Amino acid sequence: MTRAYLWITVAAVIGTYLLIVIGAIVRVTESGLGCPDWPTCHGQLIPPPDPAALIEYTHRLVGALVSGLILLVTLGAWLVPGMGRGVRVPATLVPLLLAIQIVLGGIVVRLELPAMGV
């Protein structure tokens, strides 16, 4: 395992934790519909200066960054020499789980599901 791969993996783990924390902030502040459209926010690339929109948009940006890091971890698991099944299998499953989570999140926003149902 190379140092670069290790650092990317650590960044992905820390980023995922931060994404969960920001997701909780979105939930408790009821900011989930702060940006009612996607990929823009109120039809703009930059969200309006509304707290709910800024919180939701931050969640989206961190999610995009973490998604990229996760894909790098998966790619590295297959390209870095010496990676065994113990690394490759989980690293390959993570993007699939991420895709499921993204779809579920999109359904929640599109259908404007109530918090208790989520």
Image (spheres, rainbow, N blue to C red):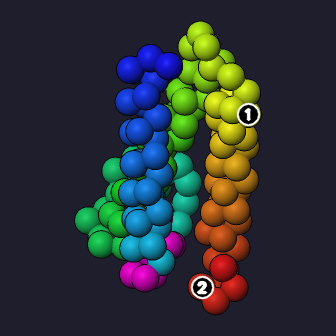
Asked whether, in this view, residue 86 is left or right of residue 42, the answer is: right
Q: Amino acid at mark 2?
A: Ala
Q: Amino acid at mark 1?
A: Val
- Considering only vertical position in the picture, is 60 above or below 111? above
Disc nearer the start of the sequence (2/1): 1
Point out which mark residue 89 bears.
1
Dot 2: few (<14), some (14–19), or many (≥20) neighbours within 10 Å?
few
Dot 1: few (<14), some (14–19), or many (≥20) neighbours within 10 Å?
few
What segment carries the magenta color? 28-35
Percent x, y for residue 49?
26, 65
Residue for point 61% across, 14% down: 82
Q: Secondary structure at mark 1?
A: helix
Q: Is residue 33 magenta?
A: yes
Helix, strand or loop: magenta stretch:
loop
Q: Secondary structure at mark 2?
A: loop
Percent x, y for residue 104?
70, 62
Percent x, y for residue 51?
30, 72
Residue for point 55% across, 30% down: 73
Foreground disc of the pair 2, 1: 1
> Residue 19, located in which quarter of the rendered image?
bottom left
Residue for point 64% across, 89% down: 116
Q: Is residue 85 magenta?
A: no
Asked whether, in this view, residue 96 is left or right of residue 4, the answer is: right
Asked whether, in this view, residue 14 is left or right of residue 117, the answer is: left
- Towards the viewer: 30 or 5: 5
Asked whether, in this view, residue 10 is left or right of residue 113, the answer is: left
In the picture as drawn, the residue positioned furthest to the top comes out as 81
Point out which mark residue 115 bears.
2
* CB under 8 Å between discs 2 and 1: no
- Towards the viewer: 23 or 51: 23
Percent x, y for residue 1?
50, 19
Q: Tell me the distance, in whole angstroms, between the alpha carbons under discs 2 and 1.
A: 34 Å
